[in-house]
């Protein structure tokens, strides 16, 4: 077997990095355009794409193309491109949640001390919670915010809120011990709960989608009018939300097989 030289190794790394940049700039790429852009043979481009797929940096797309995979979440979050990827990979699961629970579902990410709703699927009923897509809410007042923040240590949460000068950060820091107790409860039960804290007459339950490292990248949330929720049902709904999040993790290859 011919041994690869260090120069060949560096060239392979450069080609892989160039391909990662192409995937970051484009919704999808094809073998021929990768070959032309990187300056390699189509067969080499195909092998490179397959390698990135095996590492979850790329996933097959329609028409024999390839798109960004879930591993992009491990490198960073908060960018427009990452939000697009989250919408594409996790957005379809909202239909299942709404069909299962009969209520409006949402895909949510953490942005500093706030959460942003990336996408919503409204319930198929007259009296329902409307879409929140695009909106920002204080994280500490929402079920998804609590779920996402619960992955941080107490020190990290303190540093996060201390880095902002806002009414939200002052509210949390002014009742910090109480907020930590709420997050500890969220960690124990595995889901976040919001009982009219963000809006009067609205309740929500959320569970996080995690990578195999345990990093929480987004949350699934289901919200409903208060009159339709019995407090005795919150645990059952919470377990269902955890199941939906776990199903997405397994399907996208983000689950390490560890217990939640």
Image (cartoon, rainbow, N blue to C red):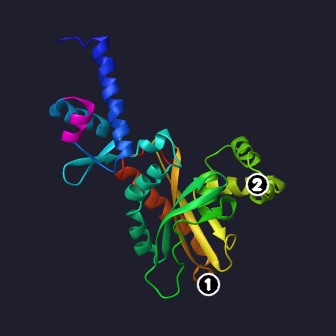
Majority secondary structure in the magenta region: helix
Q: Position of residue 53 (x, y in %)?
A: 30, 40
Task: Name the residue located 41 percent from the left edge and 52 percent from the top edge.
Answer: 85
Task: State whether residue 107 is above or below residue 28.
Answer: below
Identify the residue at image location x=68%, y=78%: 200
Q: Residue furthest right?
A: 174
Q: Secondary structure at mark 2?
A: helix
Observer able to see residue 213: no
Q: Nearer the viewer, mark 2 or mark 1?
A: 2
Point out the stretch of residues depicted in magenta: 32-40
Horizontal side of 123 relative to 144 (left or right) equals left
Residue 11: which numbered mark, if any? none
| Residue 182 visible in the picture | yes
37 in magenta: yes
Q: Is residue 81 left or right of residue 162?
A: left
Residue 199: give x, y in percent of width and height: 67, 75
- Residue pointed to by mark 2: 169
Q: On the image, numbered disc 1 is attached to which residue?
A: 227
Marks 2 and 1, Cα distance to the nearest angstrom? Answer: 31 Å
> Going 42% across and 55% down the picture, which residue do you hit?
84
32 left or right, relative to 100 = left
Depth check: give the residue in front, 233 or 159.
159
């Amino acid at each position: 077997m011919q041994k690869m030289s260090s120069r060949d190794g560096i060239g392979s790394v450069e080609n892989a990095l160039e391909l990662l940049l192409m995937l970051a700039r484009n919704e999808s790429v094809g073998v021929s355009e990768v070959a032309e852009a990187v300056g390699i043979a189509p067969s080499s481009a195909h092998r490179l794409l397959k390698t990135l797929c095996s590492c979850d940096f790329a996933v097959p797309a329609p028409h024999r193309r390839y798109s960004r995979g879930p591993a992009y979440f491990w490198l960073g979050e908060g960018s427009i491109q990452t939000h697009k990827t989250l919408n594409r990979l996790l957005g379809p699961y909202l239909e299942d949640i709404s069909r299962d629970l009969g209520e409006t579902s949402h895909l949510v990410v953490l942005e500093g001390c706030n959460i942003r709703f990336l996408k919503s699927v409204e319930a198929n009923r007259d009296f329902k919670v409307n879409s929140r897509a695009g909106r920002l809410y204080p994280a500490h007042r929402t079920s998804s915010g609590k779920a996402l923040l619960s992955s941080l240590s107490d020190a990290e949460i303190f540093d996060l809120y201390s880095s902002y000068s806002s009414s939200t950060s002052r509210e949390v820091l002014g009742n910090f011990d109480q907020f930590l107790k709420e997050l500890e409860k969220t960690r124990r039960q595995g889901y976040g709960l919001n009982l009219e804290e963000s809006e009067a007459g609205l309740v929500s339950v959320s569970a996080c989608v995690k990578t195999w490292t345990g990093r929480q990248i987004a949350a699934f949330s289901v919200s409903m009018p208060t009159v339709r929720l019995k407090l005795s049902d919150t645990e059952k709904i919470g377990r269902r939300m955890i199941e939906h999040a776990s199903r997405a993790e397994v399907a996208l290859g983000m689950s390490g097989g560890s217990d939640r």
